[in-house]
Image (tube, rainbow, N blue to C red):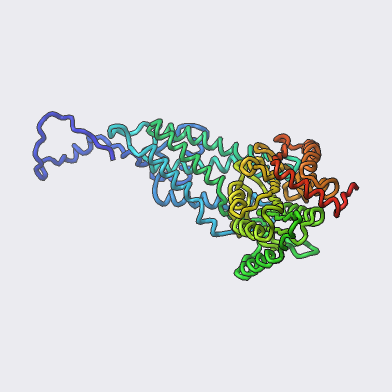
Amino acid sequence: MSVTQNTNTEKEEPFVPGANTPGPDAQEQMPAIPPEPGQSRRSDAGLSSLFIEALRASVLKQPHWENVKASPAIIAALVLAYLLYTIVFSRLAIAGPARFYWPAVAGGWFSFASWAWICYSLRHRTGKNGQAPSLAQAPDASHLFVLSMAQGLAINMALNAPLLLAGRMDWLQSDSFGPAVQWLLFLLPVLVAILVQSVFLWRASDRHPGAMFMAVIVMMIALGLQVGTRQAQYWYPKPAPDADKVSEDKSPEITQEVFESQSALFLQKLDEIQKQRPGVIDLYSLSFAPYGEEDVFLNETSMVSKVMEQRFDAAGRSLQLVNNPKTMETLPWATPLNLQRAIAHIAKRMDVNEDILFIHMSSHGASDGELSAGMWPLTVNPVTPDDLKRWLDEAGIRHRVISISACFAGNWVQPLSDPDSLVMTASDADHTSYGCGSKSDLTFFGRAMYDEQLRKQTLSFEAAHAAARPIIKQREEEAGKSDGYSNPQIAVGENIRQRLQMLEERLKKSVPVKTD
């Protein structure tokens, strides 16, 4: 409530009951008392008036604050409207059958809390020096919060409609269309919304640059948490039943029995790994496919594992770790802990000073080097280059061949490179790889490097990588890859080069190179 100062210098008369009370005529002559700041001048100001003013603010027009009502009921209605909008929008974004995941309601509340903090930090006063706010300013923080929430809902509904339409287009999701446009379609509405709301907040607030700067920082943090974390979704795709066969649900039911059987399966697979042969350079193969939502990573690691067994004499010395609903009963899960334990166990079976450990990892990759992981509802932490290096060092494994098939995989080269290691990737640190979509059987890197070169042409990882590079480049150009050549990388230490040459000489005596 505003405070007025008494500027009358005359002595104030004492109060006498009845003596100082104005009569009826005096009351009629008294001017009307203006409403307190924030008090609506319209008794019927409700949700309809609120959204009209939200639309005005969304097109950068001055809202009529007297039509904005702030109350607990209004705020609750806006929060409910946000939830319903998000639930409906996320359902419309999925073509075909989907299942509702109600626990997702428990997430996403940081955005509401941070927005309330922003509004209070920008408009916690009712006016300078106790004076009433200007017409351009919000009456108080509660009114600013209510109108900015309504404005945000209106902007999201308007800007996300084209995004929803684009997301349903098959040509946009095809491998021939690069991810750059998909990111642009996602970021453009977000950036427009931030710009419009920032202008509105500045006009309606106390216009303190420091407070506005902190508000923008908080907005960016909230956006980063929303994009960068694996939040639960309200809807998950559920394949429709086929007319001829029963559909396979990509979201498996993970029960206690599944956990117990997985533990026993992992120990069984570890026990099946054969011990090293003294005086023989053995290659041990470990493949890792942590992303279970698409079969391409299962297909690739299975193919690579077979190439290692058939061409590099790794039969009985190979292990696959895979997240995929199809392999729940046959292959151990690809989790960081399983990978760490597998490396430690293989180190005990091999001669760490004589044998070679080959690791192939296949998944989606992030620009910071993390590999995407998970198989809903199973939550799996991502693996980083530093994790893998630490586990290998702890196990004492000296000779290493590490293959990373993922976008931005070049981030793995420098942390893992040393004289005893060969590190090769499907892309450099600034570009995506290709062929990792749901419609692909193998990635471009996996097909060219392993299926076509190492399986048929050569036993040299260096030669295979060099031959695969121009093949991948040509195929990416033919497919219309929009963000440039993936530019596969390789780093070879001198010690591992000599060790691999010795292995190649041994294999050539027993495994003829196919040329067809």
Q: Is residue 211 visible?
A: yes
> Residue 62 at x, y = what percent?
45, 32
Which residue is more in the foreground, 49 or 183? 183
Could you tell whether 154 is left or right of 130 in the image? right
Could you tell whether 341 is left or right of 468 in the image? left
Q: Is residue 299 visible?
A: no
> Residue 78 at x, y = what percent?
47, 48
* Residue at (56% x, 36% y) in the render: 191
Q: Is residue 498 above or below residue 136?
A: below
> Residue 165 at x, y = what percent?
67, 43
Which residue is more in the foreground, 333 or 191? 333
* Residue at (33% x, 37% y) in the render: 125
Could you tell whether 107 is left or right of 452 in the image? left
Which residue is more in the foreground, 19 or 243? 243
Outermost residue to the bottom: 257
Question: Can you say which quadrant of the picture contains the N terminus?
Answer: top left
* Residue at (52% x, 56% y) in the render: 105
Which residue is more in the foreground, 460 or 448? 460
* Residue at (43% x, 32% y) in the render: 202
Q: Is residue 249 above or below residue 154?
A: below
